[in-house]
């Protein structure tokens, strides 16, 4: 199943009141499709996003109505107002554009110091310790930030990152969570990863 269908399945279950998903997915007030498109168009132009990544982000934010949400410990920044990635702040700092205007230079500096060949163009998510999930100018997803001083490749594209790391077995490889981790339980329940039972 493609990540787009996985995400649609989770959002539908969340909206129907799936108890565990209500604790794991933070889903804010949705934007209409016109606002999603115009907000994303501005970000794509401002941060010079490649066409393949642009299509992936368009799919992501169209399915999620532009809101900020979480896949377990992975927080994806939104286009719409809502909770900040870590905390209850209801201001613009958790929005994709604002967050990048405030913090992108930090990620770019980390990338340039460690690997001059890496050019980070956008931060689109964070993990629980505040390390960033970034897209490079060629569409590769890397981690960089406070605990990762040398960017680490996480996926060859946003599509692969969402399908494998957020909604598949790559989550297990990246975080090595306990067997009873709530996000792992959800991935098993929806059969996005095999259950060992």
Image: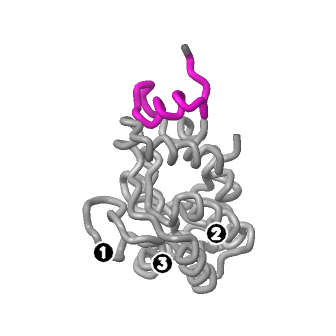
Q: Is residue 67 above or below residue 137?
A: above
Helix, strand or loop status at disc 2: strand
Q: In the rendered view, does 80 fall on the left or right side of 60?
A: left
Image location of residue 129, percent across then percent down: 36, 54
125 part of magenta stretch: no
Q: What separation in Å lies between label 1 and label 3 (alpha carbons)? A: 12 Å
- At 42% from the left and 74% from the top, the residue drawn is 99
**Placement of the C terminus among the 4 image quadrants:** top right
**Magenta region, mostly helix, strand or loop?**
loop
Q: What separation in Å lies between label 2 and label 1 (alpha carbons)? A: 27 Å
Q: Nearer the viewer, mark 1 or mark 3?
A: 1
Q: Nearer the viewer, residue 32 or 101?
A: 32
* Crowd around label 3: few <14 · some 14–19 · many ≥20 (10 Å): many
Helix, strand or loop status at disc 3: helix
- At 71% from the left and 74% from the top, the residue drawn is 50
Q: Specify the farthest residue to the left.
A: 88
Q: Nearer the viewer, residue 105 or 10?
A: 10
178 part of magenta stretch: yes
- At 56% from the left and 67% from the top, the residue drawn is 114
Q: Which residues are magenta?
A: 177-196
Q: Which residue is mark 3?
A: 97
Q: Which residue is mark 1?
A: 91
Whether residue 60 is visible here, answered yes or no, is yes
Q: Which residue is mark 2?
A: 136
Image location of residue 27, percent across then percent down: 41, 55
């Amino acid at each position: 199943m493609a990540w787009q269908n996985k995400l649609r399945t989770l959002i539908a279950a969340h909206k129907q009141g799936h108890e565990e998903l209500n604790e794991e997915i933070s889903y804010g007030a949705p934007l209409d499709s016109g606002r999603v498109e115009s907000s994303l168009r501005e970000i794509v132009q401002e941060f010079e996003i490649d066409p393949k990544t642009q299509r992936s982000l368009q799919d992501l934010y169209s399915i999620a109505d532009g809101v900020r949400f979480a896949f377990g410990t992975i927080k994806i920044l939104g286009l719409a107002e809502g909770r900040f990635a870590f905390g209850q702040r209801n201001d613009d700092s958790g929005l994709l554009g604002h967050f990048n205007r405030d913090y992108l230079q930090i990620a770019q500096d980390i990338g340039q110091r460690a690997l001059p060949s890496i050019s980070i163009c956008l931060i689109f998510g964070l993990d629980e310790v505040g390390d960033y999930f970034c897209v490079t100018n060629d569409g590769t997803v890397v981690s960089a930030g406070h605990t990762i001083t040398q960017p680490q490749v996480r996926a060859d594209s946003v599509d692969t990152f969402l399908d494998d790391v957020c909604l598949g077995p790559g989550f297990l490889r990246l975080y090595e969570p306990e067997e009873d981790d709530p996000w792992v339980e959800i991935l098993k329940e929806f059969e996005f990863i095999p259950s060992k039972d």
